[in-house]
Amino acid sequence: MIRQADQSSLRSFHTNDPFYTRILSLYESYGGGYDFVGFWVQETDGKFTAAISRFEDKFSLYLTDTSDLEEISAFLRFQGAGAVMAARGFSLDLRAERVIKGQVLRYIGEQYNSKLELYSPEIKPFYELLQSCASEIFLVPEYMTFLSDVTHRRNLGKCTLLGTDIDGTLVSGLMTVSETSSAVILGAVATHPDFRRRGLSRELVRTLASQLNAQGREAYVFSASEANTRFYQHSGFTVCAEFTELLGSLF
């Protein structure tokens, strides 16, 4: 049975799993009081077997070996999901216009402090930096959507922005896309095309990830390309899981 989640049911999984981190962070940021988010748990024989979140039409799944995948697939189709991300290896009965496969990596590197001058940039220049790096894989949302979400989560301490300047201009930055008390997912790592191959992104990633580990929090990243995976591996991360993201009309 799939039912709406409450704080007790959603926190009952007790795991630092990166897919669960995405869901719990969204819940702690928005709860159930907004129409563009939703949260559910699947319960089977008195045990919680899966967790589901929605942000607009994008769904994240935390699945287990006892999840009822047939029920979850039917639920996603009924909800009109436009995108679904889950750990690879679970056979959902969904078809998509586009499928992205990638790796989840966890930081296992040593403690590191950058010699660069790092700071927390304002949202607009950070967004403009992301725009300069936009691609088919690196998608940038509309500015007002980005501004509203990042401002809200930043005010709650659920989003961290880190960057470095050259001659007063933000040229490299990253942000956390999910944060809980025990795990954090890094994302939106970007360096302006004119300033690449200087190791700037690696400095930011290693510094923030090692700071998180020092706090007792796991640091994860999701990578959808071999080049990005190699970058993170050279920055102290190791592959710990794989994911599949289904995009388009799912049926």
Image (spheres, rainbow, N blue to C red):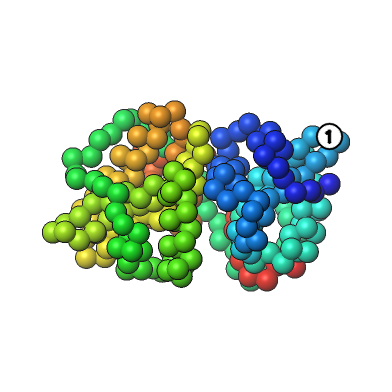
Could you tell whether 47 is left or right of 21 in the image? right
Residue 94 in picture, x, y percent from top left: 73, 62
Q: Percent from the top left, x then y, of residue 2?
A: 80, 49
Q: Does 101 sit left or right of 10 as displayed?
A: left
Q: In front here: 4 or 130?
A: 4
Residue occupying the point 30% across, 49% down: 120
Q: Is residue 25 visible?
A: yes
Q: Residue at x 63, y 70 (%)?
A: 248
In the picture of the structure, the residue carrying the numbered disc 1 is: 46
Q: Residue at x 18, y 40 (%)?
A: 115
**Kind of residue sitting beneath label 1:** Gly
Report whether 29 appears left or right of 51. left
Residue furthest to the left in view is: 167
Q: Quadrant of residue 73?
A: bottom right
Q: Is residue 9 left or right of residue 110?
A: right
| Secondary element at tag 1 | loop
